[in-house]
Image (tube, rainbow, N blue to C red):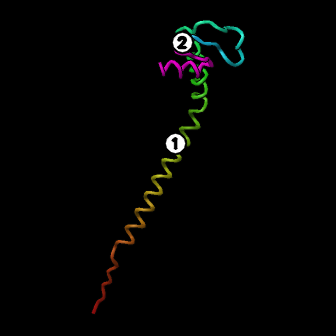
Amino acid sequence: MAILRVIGLAAGLTVTGTLTGTRTGSRAGTRTGTRITRDDLEAKLRDMAGDLDDTVETARPTLLAGAAAVAVLVVLVAYLLGRRSGRARSAVVEIRKV
């Protein structure tokens, strides 16, 4: 029941305990007092998912470039920190010829 309530709220619907409710928002007057069916929820979710898919496809190249840059930065910082700690722990040995 809780998941249906969340889905209903995401779809712009006011859901009560028996899955009846009214729409709120821009289409408030079109379906007042009618039952919210599974088809209504599926249609609204598919509409929202379609918009999300388009947004993800347009943002994908930017996100991949950013992720690659962050990965290179993390490797570089790990290398530099490891090099520094290695120098701090290594002993300096002097060899003198007598």
Q: Quadrant of residue 33?
A: top right
Q: Position of residue 27 (x, y in %)?
A: 70, 14
Q: Secondary structure at mark 1?
A: helix
Q: Residue at x 70, y 8 (%)?
A: 30
Q: Position of residue 43 (x, y in %)?
A: 57, 12
Cα gap from disc 1 to disc 2, whole angstroms: 42 Å
Q: Is residue 83 above or below residue 40?
A: below
Tell me, yes or no, whether the highlighted magenta stretch contains residue 9.
yes
Residue 95 higher or lower than 62, as above or below: below
Kindly identify the amino acid type of the residue bearing the numbered disc 2: Leu
Foreground tag (1 vs 2): 2
Q: Position of residue 70 (x, y in %)?
A: 52, 47
Determine the residue located farthest toward the top in the rendered image: 34
Instruction: Please tell me which residue lies in front, 74 or 4.
Output: 4
* Residue 62 % position (x, y): 59, 37
* Residue at position x 60%, y 19% in the image: 11
Residue furthest to the left in view is 98
Q: Which mark is residue 67?
A: 1
Q: For residue 19, which numbered disc appears in the image? A: 2
Q: Secondary structure at mark 2?
A: loop
Which stretch appears magenta?
Answer: 1-19
Looking at the image, which residue is at 32% across and 80% down? 93
Q: Are marks 1 and 2 in contact (CB under 8 Å)?
A: no
Name, please, the residue furthest toward the bottom: 98
Residues 86 and 3: in front is 3
The amino acid type of the residue labelled 1 equals: Ala
For residue 5: magenta? yes
Q: Counting other residues with Cα less than 10 Å from the Cα at mark 1, is it few (<14), some (14-19), or many (20 or more)?
A: few
